[in-house]
Amino acid sequence: MNLIDGKKISYEKRIEIEKRIEKIKQQTSKVPGLATILVGNNPASQVYIKSKIKACKDVGIKSFHHTLHENTSIENISALIKDLNNNQEVDGILLQLPLPNNQDAQDCINAINPLKDVDGLHPFNAGLLNLSKSWDEIIEKNILVSCTPLGVIHMLQMSNISITGKTAVVIGRSNLVGKPVSMLLLANNATIIMAHSKTNNLKNLCKNADIIVAAIGKPKFVNKDFIKDGAVVIDVGINRTPDGLCGDVDFDSVKDMNINITPVPGGVGPMTITMLLENTLKAFNNKINRN
Ligand code: NAP
């Protein structure tokens, strides 16, 4: 087994981002700004927000954090977002998901100016991703793509794992992970099977895949019976169990296989935050180029 070390790749990428921001600061006396919004007090969300704010500080991005009461209405969250849309110091707006009380976040996401949508979840950016014909086009047009899927592609690229011509099974079809990761793999010339809870013969489909992306949210769901020799396995899952944090892949069952795999923790998670920094810098640069 070969570990794809998300922590290491992430660290290298953050150093590069920090250098780019330092250069911008010297040239313009300005730095990118990221506004984060946390509604309620979900402990996992609090941890994620804290990590995001710290990561911003580490690379020189200015943070603007807002915590709202868990009973704040969608209208009030959207009103804050509209204020942030008009704030010239804010280049990116991140609404931490999920919202409390099972509230649908789409109306809030729709309120974000697409140019500040660093999570890539606004229909405008999701649409641009779907319309793009290649990875080069996504890069050249500076499209804001959802952070976790973007992190997956960067990890593969920085590990010198080629995607072109490969068969990839993505397990999960969420707007946050499954769909955009499938679109990005397609843009990188993979042949995609997007699987979900109604998929028949999932094990067999996976067994023939060169790349498996597990984004299910079920602890240790994917075991050695799903994976062929030589495959690449990206474990997006973050599951809190009584035994601690684990992914969607049964790591113990696959650890003696000849595969490349991302660990949990220390795989996709750190890359997600790094891509948030990258997207904030991208939104800042897009603003500078427009002016
Ligand atoms: P989600 O919205 O709940 O989607 C889960 C997907 O898995 C759905 O499409 C569902 O299919 C599919 N699924 C459920 N049971 C299945 C089964 N038995 N066989 C095949 N597919 C099945 O979750 P998400 O937001 O995409 O997140 C997925 C996981 O990634 C979670 O553990 C989450 O915590 C983690 N995550 C990690 C990061 C990170 O930074 N590492 C970021 C985001 C999310 P249906 O559509 O048919 O219901």
Image: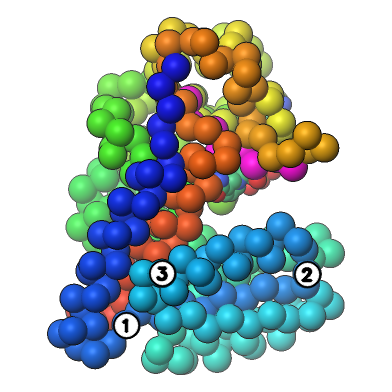
Mark 3 and mark 2: Cα distance apart in space: 24 Å
Q: From the viewer's perspective, is the residue at label 3 or at label 2 nearer?
A: 3
Q: Please tell me which residue is depicted at 24% across the width and 83% down the height of the picture.
A: 25
Determine whether, in the image, residue 145 is placed left or right of residue 99.
Answer: left
Q: Is mark 2 within 8 Å of ligand 1?
A: no
The amino acid pointed to by label 3 is: Asp
> Residue 92, image x and y in percent?
44, 75
Dot 2 amino acid type: Asn
On residue 58, which mark appears?
Answer: 3
- Structural distance between the alpha carbons of marks 1 and 3: 13 Å
**Of helix, strand and loop, which one carries label 3?**
helix
Seen in the picture, residue 5 relative to 221 is either above or below; the reply is below
Q: Look at the image and give the residue range highlighted in magenta.
A: 233-240
The residue nearer to you, when weighing 90 against 17, is: 17
Residue 243 placement (x, y as % from top left): 78, 34
- Mark 3 CB near ligand 1 (8 Å cut): no
**Residue tagged 2:** 41
- Disc number for residue 31: 1
Residue, x 44% and y 49% (percent of image)?
271
Measured as percent of width and height from the top left, residue 170 is found at 51, 30
Q: Earlier in the sequence, mark 1 or mark 3?
A: 1
State the residue in front, 172 or 38: 38
